[in-house]
Amino acid sequence: MTLDLYAALLVFAVIMAFTPGPNNTILMAGGIAHGFRRTLPVVAGVALGFPFLALCVGLGLGTLFESFPFLLRVLQVGGVIYMLWLAFKIATALPSQNDADTAGKPLNFMQAVGFQWVNPKAWIMAITALSSYTLAGHYWQGLACVVGTFLFTGITSASTWAGFGAVLKKWLTDPQWFRPINYGLAASLLLSLVPMLWH
C-alpha cells in the first residue's frame, strides 16, 4: 500500500471511529451508567470485534451475502431486534454509585463483539474501506493494513468514548440529568437504524 493511500485510509478510519454511531453510543452510555472500569469489556469487545468483522468481510463473507441475499435480511432483522433491546436497556439504566455496584450490568465482551455483526455503521465502514483501500495485486497487504488500522483506531476511540461517559458520570448521578441523557442516547441508537431500514 502506498503512503498516500494509507494516509487516506487512516483519515477515513479516524473519522468513522470517532464520530457518533451505535458503538460510541453504547460505550458512552456504559461509561455514564457503570464507570470506565466496568465498561472495559465493552471497550475490548468493540475494539477487537470490529477489526474481526472487517477481516471476515475481507476473507469473503461479502461474497456469501451476494450469493445468498436472504442471509443479509436475516442479519438485518436480528440487528433491528438487538438494537431495540439495547436502546431499551440504555433508556431504563440507573446510575451505579460506585464501580462495584452490580445493579444493572453493562454489556459483556462477547455481547460487544456480537454487536458488530448487527451494527450498520460497522458494515458500511468495513465494505467501504476494503473496496476503496485495497489494490489489485496487493490485496492481502491492503487487507492487513485495513484491519490493523481499524484495530488501532478502535482501541483509541472506544477508550475515549467510554472515558468521556465516565467523566460525565460524576456530574450525572442526579436522576434529573441522568434520565434525559440516557433517553437521548437511546434515541440516537434508534436513529442509527434508519440507514439499515431505508435500504
Image (spheres, rainbow, N blue to C red):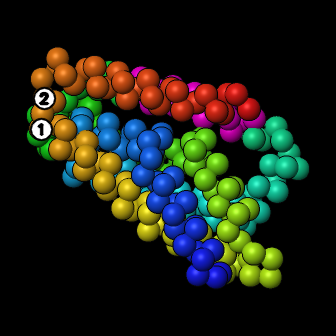
Image quadrant where residue 90 sits: top left
Q: Are marks 2 and 1 in contact (CB under 8 Å)?
A: yes
Nearest the camera: 176 or 79?
A: 176
| Any part of residue 41 in sight | no
Depicted 92 relative to depicted 3: above or below: above
User: Going by the picture, which residue comes out furthest to the top?
Assistant: 176
Q: Which residues are magenta?
A: 73-88
Q: Give the camera-side residue of 71 and 26.
A: 26
Q: Residue at x 61, y 53 (%)?
A: 125
Q: Amino acid at mark 2?
A: Thr
Q: Secondary structure at mark 1?
A: loop
Look at mark 1 in the image and give the residue it sits on.
170
Q: Toward which corner of the image does residue 99 lie, by quadrant?
A: top left
Give the quadrant of residue 96: top left
Crowding around mark 2 (Cα neighbors within 10 Å: few <14, some 14 to 19, many 20+) is some
Question: Which secondary structure dominates the residues rendered in magenta?
Answer: helix
* Residue wearing tag 2: 173
